[in-house]
Image (cartoon, rainbow, N blue to C red):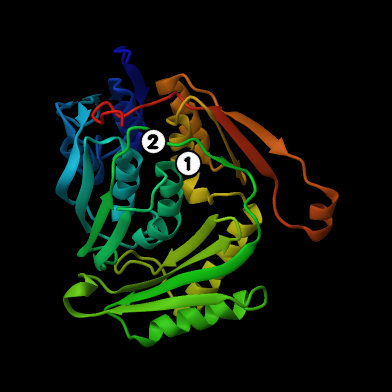
Amino acid sequence: MSTNSLNYEGCNFLRQRLILATLSGRTVKIKKIRSKEDDPGLKDFEASFIRLLDTLTNGSKIVVSETGTNLLYQPGILIGGNFEHECNPQRSIGYFLEAIIALAPFTKKPIKAILRGVTNDQIDPTVDLIRLTTLPTLKKFLGTDEGVDIKINKRGAAPDGGGEVLFTCPCRQKLRPIQFIDPGKIKRIRGIAWAARVSPAVTNRMVDSARSILNKFLTDIYIYTDHVKGSQSGKSPGFGLTLVAETTNGAFLGAERSSSARGSGDQPSVPEDLGKETAKNLLEEIYRGGCVDSTNQSTTALFMALGQQDVSKILIGELTPYTIQFLRHVQDFFQLMFKVDPVPVTEEEEELNTGGEKLLLTCVGVGYSNVSKAIL
């Protein structure tokens, strides 16, 4: 791997840069992190994320300036194994878990991680959404279902958290290339309505209002209710809904909403409104379409880029700003460019109005292999 370092400025996309640095083995220097703000430097959740990377690797060199505005990260070797991490409650466990999933296939030992903190908030993908949409994507690249799991031991709503999640994932020598260009048709919708430290009736109210919209389109809808109490309900009251549409070809498109955090200054959430909003968000994701939803675009692109030296193709909906930046970063770290082709809409699709414009994302993997894993 080349030893030359990459230089960036600002706090945006810090997580992307550090994940790609860890995988490519390249040193990253990031300057002027919130240098003009009243509270300059790294935030607590970013420091927590850097500590997580330090736990996952062996021999990483991390230097943060006194003001916290400059960061030097020289990655070590990915170790993985069994570990626990206290996730800073400013961001949910999903923020940290997405990074672990990106790195998990390439560790020396299979990962068994216990993460504590906020399981559901309004900023990051919740652990439910990651379990229902990201894990099926990960399994396609790993070529196995065994040992990939997320178990929610305790729920913790924002702002105080108190949740606990167990994530397990095997490691692989190489990832499989994928060709996934036909998502198929939506065949069923599954979901989970959760509530912690509020009335159990809240979950049913969310389910009923979501169904009032979705029942017009599909009959196979099942939304589980998960009302947690006592020690499993975390430290803050909250509720939320995650919905996932599954297609005939095994694509998973998800949407979710969580209630406003106590003390956040936002309007208190009403279960009926939240249920309807989630259902509408899901319909938007289905309209955007593709073989992965907007949350999983960047993870899928990463695994395609790191696959064997073979062509990977995937059909996706409109690129999110986060993914666009991610593709630029992949070019910086791995000198790999994706080919992005718009897919013309057929006359039949236009008549039926079956969704937004689609893109075909193609790349030849860099043939990344896990240095710690013997070739079987």
Q: Which mark is residue 300?
A: 1
Task: State left or right for residue 323 relative to residue 51.
Answer: right
In the rendered image, which quarter is residue 19 located in? Answer: top left
Q: Position of residue 289 (x, y in %)?
A: 63, 53
Q: Secondary structure at mark 2?
A: loop
**Up-down: is 366 above or below 222?**
above
Task: State left or right for residue 340 relative to residue 142.
Answer: right
Q: Position of residue 258 (x, y in %)?
A: 40, 67
Task: State left or right for residue 376 relative to residue 187.
Answer: left
Pick whichever of labels 2 and 1 is earlier in the sequence. Answer: 2
In the rendered image, which quarter is residue 349 located in? Answer: bottom right
| Front-most of residues 70 and 50 | 50
Instruction: Name the residue tied to disc 2.
Output: 13
Kind of residue at disc 2: Phe
Seen at 27% across and 65% down, the residue is 152
Q: Position of residue 198 (x, y in %)?
A: 30, 81
Kind of residue at disc 1: Thr
Seen at 23% across and 44% down, the residue is 110
* Residue 11 visible to the viewer: no
Number of marks in the image?
A: 2
* Residue 247 visible to the viewer: yes
Q: Distance between the Cα atoms at labels 2 and 1?
A: 17 Å
Seen at 32% across and 39% down, the residue is 105
